């Protein structure tokens, strides 16, 4: 059993390591909830803030929640200008309950759709206790008003509040993709208009889809072919084209033409222009197709330059998910439909149907094409005039043979850990005059990550905790450099960047945040204007190279003098600016190691056990951040410990620079800090422990070899393995303490590091709380490490 066990662990570790070797995606900075400086909105008793509509003309953020719609001030969402309640009637509630639905979960009115119809009227739909209903809302004299016209919402809004759906309002006509019936088993893509159209009820058209997103692309603009505008839809569904032993989901993009009016005999009142193709977003590892979760449409004045960005997640059911972001050129999508091959079903002996490339004759006009100049020259002015041959072809073969591939052929980001749920993208012009797409990504545990891809290199600038609870980001919007995010419990507003979070030149430049540059005159990290102009070239920013050598060398850190109380456990704090930096401690000229039982080194400090006279002296905390092969070294703190006789006191000294020293004494003279940290010395369960030790020994050797090989080959920098991205609880000091040991042992800082000395300034109270939360508890660290990699293994 143990041999297998070891093998499994090894395999897991190697795979995990290989993973982190090509995407070290630890966010460089972590901003905790307490420090996010976000503006929030929530109202007592109201939940599920999941629908947003930006009304720039009115200066409003329209917000749909459970049984309420708000008009919030777009500049400060904590100000609700007006609100309307839209509750379920007693009768509808009873009806819902009698159909077997949960009274508190299902039988409410979840607002799922908000669209602008014209300057004065908005269209709103809610699930209304499994009885979807729509209505009109007006905003005038600072007041929202529900018109109470109560229109049928079937096919516009889902019955089930947990079901995904999507919709878009184009020229006062609503396009919607949702399920049409109570059971949620009849998917439909509808246009509600004088000539309303819908999809054919066939599994080759829609096969248990989850609708994600839709939007219009104005392809008629300056079109030499006289083309029409197109509506693109993104969803995932059960594949029809693969032989697979169980249900296999695939991601799709589909399109219809705006001017479609349906067919005359064939496809009457159905789309005659519906085509779909597989969306490809392949990660380097072999895996099942990734599943689309959200889409952002980065519109461009010229539609051919517009881009769809999409989040995908892996299709396995393990807890530690892999997510990816791919970008698609609208032109590429359009070409797959207008020039690509089709797939066709063929019946094989077993009466199974296989989908293969269609190689027969393609009727004219080409199936799925909008009415264009070529069609018009044949006397076809409307889809009603299309010949039956073309229409029958589309009815039976709506699937393209080619998949749509992402720009550059691979994902912009691959991320392990909590799933990514929503994204928006801002194109930022940096100091070098180039425009960089900055991705803001909501996660299932309530964080917002900010990421950029620099010439194929993925970089996560920061992660900000948006909500107190670990709840998914359900909706995300970007408007004029402000981000708005909604979840089950509330909404937050935050600027797209807060450069003053970067406290030094090194921090500012190594952040590689396109919004920010270091201003040496003002001595601060400042936000670039939207059209950056740095005529005299004094601002410092280095996005692709991450070169901070221009940063001025600042003053030397002053030593802090502290008392050493004999027999005490002493903690010295020191926290790096960056999660990617490694901290090392130096005591009277030699480096301290966690393997020495005298010390435990944490991500934000060191603990010295049972202080002796010999422990008095100078302690120096240094951080090294390796970026692009260059080490950036900073002295973060210096402590002079001076011996003092035993006193029966608890001291806590806070220093303005934010470094805290605490020592606790009891009458016994020896006490663990708040009873939390204890040495991971002995472990119970002898048999298991032996296996563990063997496993660990083999592991260490293998790891060592792997590391050395990788280092030798220059594949990874010394600290990449065991990166935090593979952890479910990434902000765990224990794990990073472990990293420190691995890192420092291989960390030969002999590459002539240039030393930049800086002063640390941060909030001391936060450091103290962090310490206690992050303290290790007994034998947990090793176990969690190992079992985590077994989880990884099961995912392969
Ligand atoms: C930016 O961050 C600084 C320091 O963390 C904070 O004081 C300030 O309020 C923040 N500004 C905004 C607009 O969030
Ligand atoms: C706005 O749309 C509504 C609903 O279609 C219509 O009743 C109203 O007259 C329109 N108002 C204006 C100003 O166009
Ligand atoms: C999309 O593709 C078209 C045609 O190949 C090209 O002209 C355009 O620059 C591309 N846009 C982007 C953003 O890559
Ligand atoms: C609504 O919010 C509650 C938490 O308050 C959550 O449990 C539930 O899943 C949410 N429902 C939907 C449909 O998002
Ligand atoms: C420790 O610090 C001393 C004094 O700053 C320095 O001379 C020595 O090289 C350092 N040693 C290590 C291993 O970093």
Image (cartoon, rainbow, N blue to C red):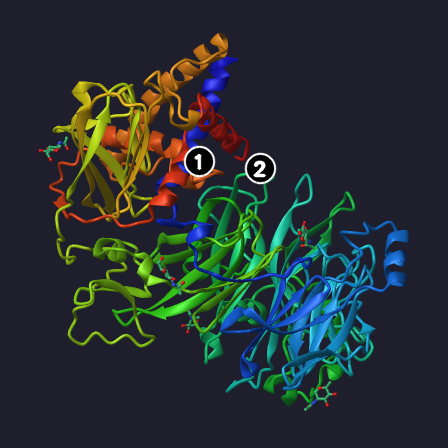
Left or right position of 19 against 556: right
Picture quadrant of residue 181: bottom right
Report x, y in % for residue 669.
32, 18
Q: Is residue 588 above or below residue 422?
A: above
Q: Are marks 2 and 1 in contact (CB under 8 Å)?
A: no
Q: Is residue 23 visible?
A: no
Check disc 1: other Cα within 10 Å, few if <14, some if 14-19, many if 20+. Answer: few
Which residue is painted at 59% across and 40% down in the image?
316
Q: Nearer the viewer, residue 339 or 497?
A: 497
Q: Secondary structure at mark 1?
A: helix
Compared with 737, 132 (above or below) is below
In space, the residues marked 2 and 1 are separated at their CA atoms by: 27 Å
Q: Position of residue 537 (x, y in %)?
A: 16, 71
Q: Nearer the viewer, residue 334 or 158?
A: 158
For marks 2 and 1, the one nearer the N-term is: 2
Q: Quadrant of ligand 3?
A: bottom left
747, above or below 356, in the image: above
What residue lies at 78% left-to-right and 83% top-to-bottom? 194
Mark 1 = which residue? 773
Nearest the viewer among 25 and 201 is 25
For this orientation, the residue located farthest to the front is 648
């Amino acid at each position: 059993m143990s041999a297998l066990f070891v093998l499994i662990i090894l395999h897991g570790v190697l795979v995990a390591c290989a993973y982190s070797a090509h995407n070290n995606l630890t966010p460089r900075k972590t901003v905790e909830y307490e420090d996010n400086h976000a503006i929030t909105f929530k109202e007592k008793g109201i939940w599920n803030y999941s629908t947003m509509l930006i009304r720039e003309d009115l200066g409003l953020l329209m917000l749909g929640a459970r049984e309420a719609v708000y008009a919030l001030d777009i500049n400060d969402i904590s100000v609700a200008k007006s609100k309307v309640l839209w509750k379920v009637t007693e009768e509808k509630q009873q009806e819902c309950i009698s159909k077997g639905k949960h009274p508190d979960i299902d039988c409410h009115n979840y607002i799922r759709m908000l669209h602008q119809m014209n300057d004065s009227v908005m269209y709103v739909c809610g699930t209304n206790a499994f009885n979807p209903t729509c209505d009109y809302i007006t905003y005038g004299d600072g007041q929202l008003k529900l018109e109470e016209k109560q229109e049928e919402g079937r096919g516009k809004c889902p019955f089930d509040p947990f079901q995904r759906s999507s919709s878009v309002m184009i020229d006062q006509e609503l396009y919607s993709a949702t399920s049409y019936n109570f059971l949620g088993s009849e998917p439909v893509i509808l246009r509600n208009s004088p000539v309303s159209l819908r999809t054919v009820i066939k599994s080759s058209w829609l096969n248990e889809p989850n609708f994600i997103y839709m939007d219009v692309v104005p392809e008629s603009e300056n079109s030499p072919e006289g083309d029409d505008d197109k509506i693109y839809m993104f969803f995932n569904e059960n594949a029809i084209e693969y032989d697979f032993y169980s249900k296999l989901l695939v991601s799709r993009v589909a399109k219809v033409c705006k001017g479609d009016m349906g067919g005359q005999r064939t496809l009457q009142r159905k789309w005659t222009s519906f085509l779909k193709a597989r969306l490809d977003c392949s990660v380097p590892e072999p895996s099942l197709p990734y599943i689309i979760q959200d889409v952002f449409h980065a519109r461009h004045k010229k539609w051919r330059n517009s881009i769809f960005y999409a989040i995908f997640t892996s299709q396995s059911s393990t807890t530690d998910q892999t997510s990816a972001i791919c970008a698609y050129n609208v032109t590429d999508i359009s070409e797959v439909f207008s020039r690509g091959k089709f797939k066709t079903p063929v019946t094989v002996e077993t009466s199974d149907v296989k989908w293969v490339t269609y190689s027969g004759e393609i009727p004219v006009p080409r199936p799925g094409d909008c009415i264009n100049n070529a069609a018009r020259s044949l006397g076809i002015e409307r889809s009603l005039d299309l010949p039956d041959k073309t229409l029958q072809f589309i009815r039976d073969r709506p699937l393209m043979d080619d998949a749509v591939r992402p720009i550059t052929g691979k994902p912009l980001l691959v991320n392990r850990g909590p799933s990514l749920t929503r994204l928006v993208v801002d194109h930022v012009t940096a100091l070098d005059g180039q425009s960089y797409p900055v991705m803001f990504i909501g996660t299932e545990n309530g964080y917002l990550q900010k990421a950029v891809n620099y010439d194929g290199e993925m970089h996560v600038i920061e992660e900000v905790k948006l909500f107190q609870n670990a709840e998914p980001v359900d909706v995300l919007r970007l408007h004029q450099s402000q981000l708005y995010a909604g979840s089950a419990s509330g909404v937050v507003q935050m600027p797209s960047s807060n450069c003053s979070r970067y406290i030094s030149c090194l921090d500012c430049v190594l952040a590689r945040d396109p919004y920010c540059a270091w201003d040496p005159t003002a001595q601060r990290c400042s936000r670039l204007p939207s059209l950056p102009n740095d005529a005299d070239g004094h601002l410092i920013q280095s996005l692709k190279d991450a070169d901070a050598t221009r940063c001025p060398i600042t003053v030397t850190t002053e030593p802090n003098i502290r008392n050493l109380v004999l027999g005490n456990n002493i903690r010295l704090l020191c926290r790096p600016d960056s999660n990617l930096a490694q901290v090392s401690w130096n005591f009277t000229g030699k480096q301290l190691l966690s393997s020495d039982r005298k010390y435990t080194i944490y991500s934000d400090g060191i603990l010295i056990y049972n202080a002796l006279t010999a422990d008095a002296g100078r302690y120096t905390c240094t951080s090294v951040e390796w970026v692009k092969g260059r080490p950036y070294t900073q002295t973060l703190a210096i402590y002079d410990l001076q011996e003092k006789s035993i006193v029966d006191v608890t001291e806590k000294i806070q220093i303005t620079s934010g470094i805290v020293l605490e020592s606790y004494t009891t009458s016994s003279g020896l006490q663990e800090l708040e009873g939390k940290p204890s040495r991971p010395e002995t472990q119970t369960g002898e048999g298991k422990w032996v296996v563990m030790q063997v496993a660990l020994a083999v592991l260490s050797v293998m790891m060592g070899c792997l590391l050395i090989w990788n280092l030798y080959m220059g594949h990874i920098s010394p600290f990449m393995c065991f990166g935090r991205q593979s952890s479910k609880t990434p902000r765990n000091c224990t794990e990073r303490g472990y990293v420190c040991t691995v890192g420092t042992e291989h960390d030969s800082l002999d590459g002539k590091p240039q030393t930049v000395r800086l002063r640390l300034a941060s909030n001391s109270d936060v450091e103290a709380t962090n310490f206690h939360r992050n303290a290790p508890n007994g034998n947990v660290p090793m176990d969690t490490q190992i079992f985590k990699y077994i989880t990884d293994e099961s995912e392969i």
